[in-house]
Image: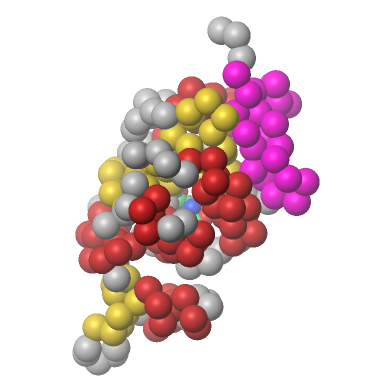
Amino acid sequence: MAFTFFFRDTQTLEYAVKILTPEVAGRSRIRVWDAGCAMGPEPYTLAILFAEEMGNFSFKNLYISATDIDETDQFGKIIQEAVYSEEETKRIPPAIFAKYFEVVEGDPVRYRLKNLIRERIQFQKHDLLTLKPVGENYSLITCKNVLLHFQQNERIEVIKMFHKSLAPGGLFATEHTQKMPEELSHMFQQVVPDAQLFRKVEVLS
Ligand SMILES: C[S@@+](CC[C@H](N)C(=O)[O-])C[C@H]1O[C@@H](n2cnc3c(N)ncnc32)[C@H](O)[C@@H]1O
């Protein structure tokens, strides 16, 4: 199983959500792509952060496309059910946990994300190395703890694909230890000094 957990590196995700929310207010469709989403804790964390930041009206217009190569063929089912164990949910801040999860009776007891959050995520199996995007016009693409598994030339091609798939001025988020390759530095501008969060820069093709 892929290693992931709820509220992992929230600083980067929080920056993205706080910066994006006022920029997309009033849009009828706010598109986000979580590439390499594993079993769901990351896209669900993102949806919760958006729910906390956005009003109800904007939040209903949020569509998170969660994708993964999913070699186990289980992520789709896990994400759709959105039921997680005590162990998996223990890092979630208590007030957030109480607000967005409900108890699934049984032994051991487990917890399900409420429909409000579940409805915002759509899972799709997808291999990033095909370099074929799952969509376009994304306001945010997050790809965390995935690119490190690729060769440098693959990483460059995948990030170029993200650039093409972003809406004008869209944001790209990756993990702290992942630096933007020098070859692509003209395509993105770092948004804050303490997170790997970048804004798309238009380039002449
Ligand atoms: C360490 S997990 C990271 C999960 C999540 N993004 C996080 O940061 O918590 C890496 C994920 O990348 C996925 N992955 C690896 N190669 C991939 C590829 N070529 N295309 C799409 N997903 C891939 C794995 O299946 C795994 O779920």
Residue segment shown in magenta = 180-202
Does residue 90 belong to the magenta stretch?
no
Residue 97 occupies quadrant = bottom left
Residue 78 occupies quadrant = bottom left
Depth check, front residue: 81 or 63: 63
Q: Residue furthest top?
A: 205
The colour scheme applied to this rendered structure is secondary structure
- Would you place residue 202 above or below residue 139 in this image? above
- Would you place residue 178 above or below residue 17 in this image? above
Instruction: Name the residue rendered at 32%, 52% in the picture.
Output: 60
Q: How many marks?
A: 0
Instruction: Name the residue rendered at 53%, 25% in the picture.
Output: 168
Quadrant into which the C terminus falls: top right
Q: Is residue 200 visible?
A: yes
- Say whether residue 33 is left or right of residue 119: right
User: Residue 172: x and y, percent?
Assistant: 57, 38
Q: Residue furthest right?
A: 193
User: Residue 187: x and y, percent?
Assistant: 64, 23
Depth check, front residue: 15 or 180: 15
- Say whether residue 176 is left or right of residue 169: right
User: Residue 163: x and y, percent?
Assistant: 53, 26
Instruction: Name the residue rendered at 47%, 76% in the picture.
Output: 96
User: Residue 69: x and y, percent?
Assistant: 35, 44
Quadrant into which the N terminus falls: bottom left
Instruction: Name the residue rendered at 59%, 61% in the picture.
Output: 10
Q: Is residue 143 visible?
A: no
Does residue 197 belong to the magenta stretch?
yes
